[in-house]
Amino acid sequence: MHDPLAERPITAMGYRTPVGRPLDGVRVIDTSTGPAGGVATMVLADFGADVIKVEPPGGDRFRSLAASPLWLRGKRSVVLDLHNDSERAHLHDLVCSADVLVTGGPPARSARWGVDYAAAVSLRPDIVHCSLTGWGETGPLANLPGYAATVAARAGRMKGFTGQVLRDGPVYAALPAHMHIAAHGAVQGIVSGLLARDRTGLPQRVTTSLLQSLMPFDLVDLLLIQMADRWGASPIPNPQGGAALPSLNYHPVMAGDGRWIQCGNLLEHLFLSFLDAIDLYGELLADERFLDSPAVWTPDAIEHVRDRILEVIQTKTADEWMAIFHENGNVAAEPYLTPAEAMDHPDLVDNGMIVEFDDPVVGRVRAIGPVSVLTNTPAVVTRPAPTIGQHTDEVLAEAARSAPTRTAPAAEGATPSGYPLAGVTILEFATVIAAPLGTSMLADLGARVIRVEPVDGDPFRHLYGHGYMTVKTTAGKESIYVDMKRPEARDIVQRLLRSADVLVHNYRPGVPERLGIGYEQLAADHPGLVWVSVLGYGPHGPSAHRPATHPCAGAAMGGAGFQAGSALTRTCSTLEEVREASRQIMKANEANPDPNTSAIVASSALLALLARSRDPQHRGQAVYVDMMTANAHANIDAFLSYDGMAARPVMDDALLGLGACDRLYRCSEGWVALTVTTDAEWERLCAVAARFDLLADDRFTGAAGRQQHDRDLAGVLEALFATRTAVEWEAVLAGSGVACVQADECTPGEFEARSEHLRQNGFVPVVQHARFGEMRRWGPIVQVNGGRDSYGPGVLGGADTDSLLAEIGYTPAEIATLRSTRAVSSEDTAPYSG
């Protein structure tokens, strides 16, 4: 087949002739099935790895998903029947020639195939072995079916959406964003494992799961639950919970043409710019109720402003308002789009993030491109998805005639470390969530992360007081407060840079240069520096200069609309109906776009570090990550188009799910989430429930029949599940291999705080926080060689100001002078007392 990309490879932002990619020469054997492992190895392939997908006869059953041409791109396919001894021997030959082995599903299956970690190391002593499971490697839930919806329901994510629609019970979580996080957990573990293997010659064991990949989406609930346990009550209502109307800063608004726009003006100066852009600021200033900061407006005043905003926005179309916001340049807002519409978003297009290729099965494909831009070693989409078994003969022949190239022998007695990034130092100039949470992921892998914060601290520290919201985003770091606008700051930063490997910032274009930390300003003196820019929109395009926050990305890339269901298309005839629709839409637009971006921040920094480590000249580079591209990847199930592509499913009006075989059901007590994807699973469900009549019902024979008669099937299953409690159904069905679990037992934070399964897997380590005392914190999204011996707590603002200044050569007298002039500072360190 003619492949135009093989002749002229396409990379993001127009880089077309890379001198090399970070993973060139790395061979990856992928035995996983479905999109979680598929996306992870797609990223590896985009960045140069030779990915060999091992499929059963007939192919990976998830090839039937509409997005499979996207996450299969760049790979070669080998068909092996791993139930057959001789075919497994071929797999073992492939492992002998591999650098990386990726396995998926329950650990017992990998052991049966002889590709668990111990078996793989016996075949290839310096292998990087990655296990991506549903629930983790051990514990009481380890062998439950590991579908994304099943894990989300059991871990509380669906209960977390309670209140989105006006009924009792949990709400189906439509976007499997934790699958995106798990894929990047695998990427991070594999790339950091390669760095450690290249350095030590030792094998590396990487473990990640869908379950631990849910934890980035809980920003504060785990902390609040522990505080309530200790002091008798939570100090604040959970800002992610409840069914209240949105804040004025983060408010969906309906324009005059019925289309919705999401506002994302978290900080006060952005909110005031928004009021000015819609010509409401002057009106409010004429009323003495609004002369003070919006932070102290009374509840009645807030409701008055809410209604005026909703009324004013209905005077123009969505396009007219967006033109005004673009011209203003300081308003964070985006229209609600579907992924199909978002593929024409000017900022994705102008930044080169949309690629096209010819697929051998579905024809011309237009899709989201690589996850980020590494300017010196950019990713390239070199080939389309393979046909089933297309490369079996050539790959097996290669394995038969090639001896593996191994790294240098390990030192005698050396053992693999849970700190693969030991010795890596990262300077973080970033605020709020997306970039800081990304560097926390790197800290969990052993990097030293130093936060260089404004002299009054990250504004996120002051949200709700006491720094609740930054306990998570500062985990495992050190902090120094520096006034970057003062000349003394330049010297402090330059001294810190002497030992830095990575600099991460989330300033808008032009700001780093004004502060003296632009890439070109630093590269001459620090040629090995990996400089990571985390933007809302990317450095090119019409919105490069504009602010963006997580609700904007959630709206613009289609994830929030997927969760919102019919609320976006409902006719609203009264202001009260607009208020209620806005409440439901904002409940759908929860915090996942920030962690979705964080995962790509960490993956991209690691890929650039690997490129540097393999470069004889040890060169760093500029790296660009943006929230829009990151969240396009989180919507990867629908971020492509080709002729005949199946439409993305939609939620029913009650937000119960995506169809009878993938939805929530009310039981005699409680709720369950059911996922049935195969005939075998349907047969087990009917057998365990003693409903053999359903097996004989022609309407429900085969997946096509069940889909055609979806409404009838939903009615039958509603009646069935109403006969027992949710606890009983989980016991009999999940224990028999049917993905059916209780969905309303707990919220995510409650699950994290109480789950013995999480504790057995080391997913909620105990730390000592300087303000809140002993607590369990959110664990890592990936563990290498069992993970760290201990994980760091969140850090108080400026807690390390003096020690860091001393480390880089300042005397006590000089430090005292810097403090007296407020060139540096730190926050109060008094412990919380309830």
Image: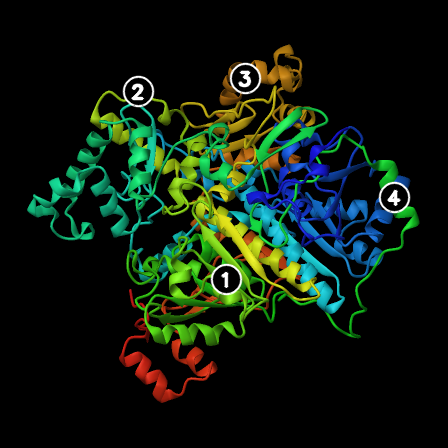
Q: Which mark is residue 571?
A: 2
Front of the two marks 2 and 1:
1
Front of the two marks 3 and 1:
1
Q: Which of 3 and 778 lies nearest the eye of the viewer?
A: 3
Q: Secondary structure at mark 1?
A: helix
Q: Which mark is residue 90?
A: 4
Residue 264 position within the rendered picture, expressed as x and y whole percent measured from the top left: 33, 43
Instruction: Specify which label sits upstream in the sequence, 3 or 1.
Output: 1
Q: Are marks 3 and 4 in contact (CB under 8 Å)?
A: no
Residue 428 position within the rendered picture, expressed as x and y whole percent measured from the top left: 46, 63
Task: Say whether residue 602 is left or right of residue 472.
Answer: right
How would you rate the neighbour count of disc 1 (Cα within 10 Å): few for under 14, some for 14-19, many for 20 or more?
A: some
- The residue at the point 25 percent across, 42 percent down is 274
Location of the C terminus by quadrant is bottom left
Q: CA distance from mark 4 to mark 2?
A: 60 Å
Q: CA distance from mark 2 to mark 1?
A: 52 Å
Instruction: Specify which label sits upstream in the sequence, 2 or 1.
Output: 1
Q: Which of 143 and 349 lies nearest the eye of the viewer?
A: 349
Q: Which amino acid, by three-letter code, is at mark 1?
A: Glu
Q: Which amino acid, by three-letter code, is at mark 2?
A: Thr
Q: Which mark is residue 710?
A: 3
Front of the two marks 3 and 2:
2
Q: Are marks 4 and 2 in contact (CB under 8 Å)?
A: no
Q: Which amino acid, by three-letter code, is at mark 4?
A: His
Residue 296 position within the rendered picture, expressed as x and y whole percent measured from the top left: 17, 52
